Amino acid sequence: MKSIHEKIHKWYKTHGRTDLPWRTVTDPYPIYLSEVMLQQTQVKTVLERYYFPFLEAFPTLKSLGEAPLDAVLKHWEGLGYYNRAKNLHKAAQVLLQKGQAQGIAPTLPSDIDTLFKLPGIGKNTAHAIAAFAFRQPVPVMEANVKRILCRLHRLRTPDEKRLWKLAYGMVDKENPFDYNQAMMDIGATLCIPKDPKCDLCPLESICKGKNTPRTYPLKKKRSVPTREEHIMISVYNDRLALTKRSGKFLHGLWGFASAEVPLCASEPIGEVSHAYTHFKLKCKVWVHHELEPEQESYFTPEEIKDLAVSKVDEKIVKLYLDTIQQ
Ligand code: SF4
């Protein structure tokens, strides 16, 4: 593998995204934060809108652990997959408590098994923190790397265990940081799903799947169900009723109530929809004017901007404002 490692490093020095801010720091906390943000979100979005403001609001693990969940969710607003933010916050609290018991500032553990036990840290994130924050000789296995491994070994249906074994067999133990970053960049820029650029790839000489790369891995066909809901906007004195969600879905965020059937005196104002990973949500939105307050909390549209609300509730507020301005 030595000559391949050399090719990978050479390619990374010239073409890699070496200046990404989480690649130029040694503090494990921002590296951890970037790994969590990047779990479901593209680099461009994280970089342009979320990474720096979040770090400005919560510059250390300690400040994150001490912050109220509402403030953390507000800074995560729009990034989606809010469980990531809740687990990040929970993990910071666990580490804060541990640090307090020992009389030290909270720190991330460097050991993969201990990292894996923290809320929201899966096998890949634990490996990524170990490799990037603590320079351990372990591979990472995000979606781009998986695709590369499938193509290198002509695997149509990737088996996690086999992939990890192959990844461990391939990692450059002398420079795992650059190696892993390079693999992720090769996957993101060369070994792309539709039109891989094999002639530019440093792995071309060992790639068994380069003649038919698009056949590896096999694409899973997923049909996404549509969930339909009636959403009630209860208005009292130009203020809208919102409740804090307590179920599994969007837990902790503020939102409008849904109803099995709309209230009799309510008026439909339109529809909004939003696509989540496992389903599409289609909401028929109704407005109901209350003569006296029937709910616990009411907010003006201006005040709602300061609450942590989901994308779909943001769309509902916009629909409401468009309707009353007509
Ligand atoms: S040679 Fe082509 S298919 Fe193989 S890893 Fe490189 S880009 Fe992917």
Image: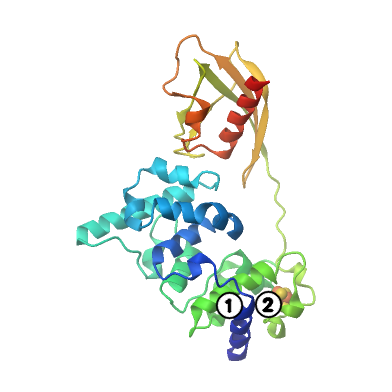
Q: CA distance from mark 1 to mark 2?
A: 10 Å
Location of the C terminus (image quadrant): top right
Q: Identify residue type, mark 1.
A: Leu
Residue 260 vs 278, above or below: the answer is above
What percent of the width, then of the height, locates residue 10? 61, 84
* Callout 2 secondary element: helix
Q: Looking at this rendering, what residue extends furthest in the bottom direction?
A: 3
Quick check: marks 1 and 2 in contact, CB under 8 Å? yes
Q: Which residue lies at the image location 65% right of the left edge and 70% below the top edge?
A: 187
Q: Which residue lies at the image location 54% right of the left edge and 75% below the top edge?
A: 180
Near mark 2 (Cα within 10 A), the count class, few <14, some 14-19 or many ≥20, is some
What percent of the width, then of the height, locates residue 51? 50, 56
Q: Which residue lies at the image location 40% right of the left edge and 73% below the top edge?
A: 134
Near mark 1 (Cα within 10 A), the count class, few <14, some 14-19 or many ≥20, is some
Q: Is residue 224 left or right of residue 214?
A: left
Q: Which residue lies at the image location 38% right of the left edge and 60% below the top edge?
A: 117
Residue 166: mark = 1
Q: Find residue 69 and report its image quarter.
A: top left
Mark 1 or 2 closer to N-term? 2
- Decide if residue 218 is in sight here: yes
Q: Is residue 32 left or right of residue 257?
A: left
Residue 119 vs 246, above or below: the answer is below
Identify the image's colour scheme: rainbow, by chain, secondary structure or one colour. Answer: rainbow
Q: Identify residue type, mark 2.
A: Leu
